[in-house]
């Protein structure tokens, strides 16, 4: 059984951190800390925050998420994504708290044909993926109670993400060329946060040590970046007097980025469903909801 008590959310101003604060309304005492109060690059700050807050559950939505920048800042990415989760996990274990952490499809190399399952061999292609994988391993090694939710292609009405980039470019250009040979499941931070709440609600009264582990957690279905862009422009309302741009698919080789990305990022959510009975919406429905909520149409 996990300790009950305060829910501590880290990464308060990030896409997921914002949505977790909404999803955990009414879940008792909830505290949310941003980088200014808990900078994961400083282990002593993490220890002090955990000591002061003494949470029953820690939801760690803070991470170094600049995938391309991580190629030139691998040490910082490793500190925040690789080392800090281990510090958090050790602190959580000391006080009997459950650590809920988020990881990524980028731990895989994309070479599989079907959806990736939790036990598939990892082989990250970029520094961000390597740092997130190190974080997963450090958490497991700490020996406490934890859930790691691997997710993909996260977006919301806030922050820097593919949806907001497309809507901005869509207002500026008549034609967009978007990668069509990398596939994954676009996942809204809201769907992720609600699924997290659903899992936490279930386990709060009966978490078994054996439940600790990695679970894939993405919206249902899959598409390419190009398919995602086309769906955004199909559903979003165009600016007055204008139409959205034509979107053409291109191979990733025509859109070079600092970090390599997997060809197939699709994760199987079967383990999450079978253990917790939790399922996220289809990615198209989650997109419609986000467009509606954000009034960005
Ligand atoms: N975004 C995706 O496509 C994606 C895909 C797969 C998995 N994930 C995982 O999902 C989780 C949530 O991601 P997200 O999309 O919500 O990311 P996000 O919007 O970039 O938010 C991350 C938050 O972490 C904070 N942060 C960065 N460095 C920090 C540090 N040293 N100490 C404390 N806070 C720090 C950021 O603060 P600043 O604003 O001050 O930098 C930001 O508020 C992460 O674990 C991420 O790795 C994300």
Image: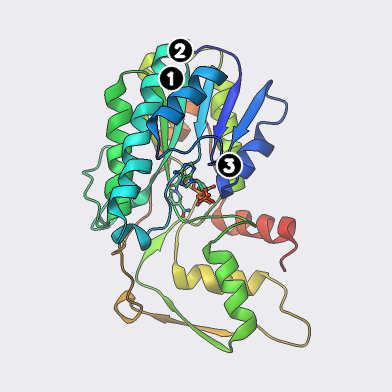
Q: Is residue 92 visible?
A: yes
Mark on residue 17?
Answer: 3
**In the current view of this chain or complex, which residue is farthest to the right?**
240
Secondary structure, mark 3, is helix
Against 215, residue 75 (above or below) is below
The residue lying at 21 percent from left, 43 percent from top is 121
Q: Are marks 3 and 2 in contact (CB under 8 Å)?
A: no
Residue, disc 2: 95
Q: Quadrant of residue 36?
A: top right
Q: How is the image coloured?
A: rainbow
Against 243, residue 71 (above or below) is above
The residue lying at 67 percent from left, 24 percent from top is 27
Q: Earlier in the sequence, mark 3 or mark 1?
A: 3
Q: Nearer the viewer, residue 245 or 56?
A: 56
Using a 10 Å C-alpha cutoff, classify the residue at mark 2 as few (fewer than 14 neighbours), some (14 to 19) or many (20 or more). Answer: some
> Residue 201: where, in percent of width, then height?
59, 23
Q: Are marks 2 and 1 in contact (CB under 8 Å)?
A: yes
Mark on residue 92?
Answer: 1
Measure the alpha-carbon separation of dots 2 and 1: 5 Å
The residue lying at 61 percent from left, 59 percent from top is 287
> Residue 236: where, in percent of width, then height?
68, 70
């Amino acid at each position: 059984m996990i300790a009950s008590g305060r829910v501590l959310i880290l990464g308060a101003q990030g896409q997921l951190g914002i949505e977790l604060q909404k999803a955990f309304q009414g879940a008792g005492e909830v505290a949310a800390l941003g980088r200014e109060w808990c900078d994961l690059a400083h282990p002593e700050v993490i220890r002090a925050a955990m000591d002061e807050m003494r949470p029953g559950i820690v939801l760690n939505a803070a991470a170094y998420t600049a995938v391309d920048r991580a190629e030139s800042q691998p040490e910082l990415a490793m500190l925040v994504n690789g080392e800090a989760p281990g510090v958090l996990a050790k602190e959580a274990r000391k006080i009997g708290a459950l650590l809920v952490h988020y990881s990524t499809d980028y731990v895989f190399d994309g070479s599989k044909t079907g959806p990736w399952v939790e036990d598939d061999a990892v082989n990250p292609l970029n520094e961000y993926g390597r740092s997130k994988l190190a974080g997963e391993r450090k958490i497991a090694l700490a020996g406490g109670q934890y859930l790691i939710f691997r997710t993909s292609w996260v977006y919301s009405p806030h922050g820097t993400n593919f949806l907001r980039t497309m809507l901005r470019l869509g207002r500026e250009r008549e034609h967009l060329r978007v990668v069509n040979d990398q596939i994954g499941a676009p996942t809204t931070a809201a769907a992720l946060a609600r699924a997290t709440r659903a899992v936490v609600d279930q386990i709060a009264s009966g978490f078994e040590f054996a439940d600790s582990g990695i679970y894939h957690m993405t919206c249902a279905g899959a598409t390419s970046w190009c398919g995602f862009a086309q769906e955004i422009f199909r559903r979003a309302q165009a600016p007055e007097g204008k139409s959205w741009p034509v979107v053409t698919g291109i191979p990733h080789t025509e859109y070079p980025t600092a970090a390599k990305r997997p060809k197939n990022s699709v994760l199987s959510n079967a383990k999450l469903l079978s253990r917790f009975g939790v399922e996220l919406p289809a990615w198209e429905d989650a997109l419609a909801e986000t467009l509606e909520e954000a009034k960005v149409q």
